[in-house]
Amino acid sequence: MNTRRGVVAGAPRGGGASAERAHARRRVVDAVREAASSGELAPRQWLVEAELSERYGVSRACAREALLELAAEGLVERVPHRGARIRVVGSREAVEITEVRRALEELSVARAVQRLRDEESDRLGTMATRMCQVLDAGNLTGYARLSTDLHARIRVLGGQETARAVVDRLEGRTARHQFRLLLRPGRPAASLREHLRIIDAVRERDPERAVHAVRAHLTRVATLLAVGGEAESRR
């Protein structure tokens, strides 16, 4: 075996650097997804490589790779000679995404019930209390963020990594539509009731009721998105 100072001949070089670059790219991708999901980044908002590089402490090349990955999954669009920006998602696509989410989140919540530990149950109870407090204060932006956090937490508890990865990639594309639903009269209170039913069913370790609560919630969201899309098309 040929070696040079303890390095096996033929072994990949620069593995540490490659892993570090991949980690940096993943950090940018996850940050942009989260910003899109929370509404911090709006549709058509430009994403400048130099700004991303400076903000997240990565190279321009790394920022460019992150934008390419986000474009491949549909969150970002690349405009020739202009750059990259958050892609506008129409109502029909938002409905389709929500329908896909529904199937995957039903799977996740069923598994979450099976895997739930007491400390995680307590954490969900705290999230429920916080959602009530924020909505009582009229903070719709804060409530929307907590709603996103709740769904994400259930996916983590479910431990179905493929479902989690798919939904994580999809969720940011419907953030604008989801927030607009909260502006409808009565929707915030209805949304809170739906989320509390999900939390109660999970904490009571009732998989059938938890799946039904998730299905009812996301079916309602999809229905409202479809109705809103039809209203927009008539304008």
Image (cartoon, grey):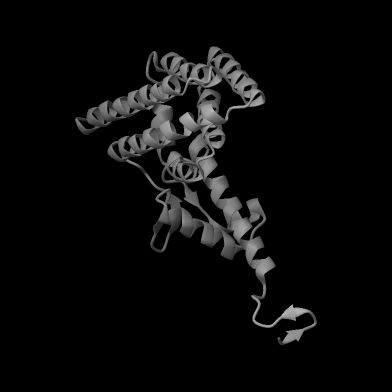
| Residue positioned most to the left | 234
Residue at horizontal 80 percent and vertical 82 percent from the top: 5
Q: Quadrant of residue 131?
A: top right
Query: In which quadrant of the rendered image does the C terminus lie?
Result: top left
Q: x%, y% of residue 66?
A: 53, 57
Q: Nearer the viewer, residue 129 or 81?
A: 129
Q: Residue at x 31, y 35 (%)?
A: 95
Q: Position of residue 227 (x, y in %)?
A: 26, 26
Give the residue at x 38% y 33%: 102
* Horizontal relation, residue 165 to residue 232: left or right: right
Vertical relation: 57 (above or below) 150: below
Is 180 left, or right, of 10 in this rendering? Answer: left
**In this view, which residue lies farthest toward the right?**
5
Q: How many marks?
A: 0
| Image quadrant containing the N terminus | bottom right
x and y percentages locating residue 68 in the rendered image: 47, 59
* Residue 62, above or below 123: below
**Where's residue 180, x and y in %?**
40, 27
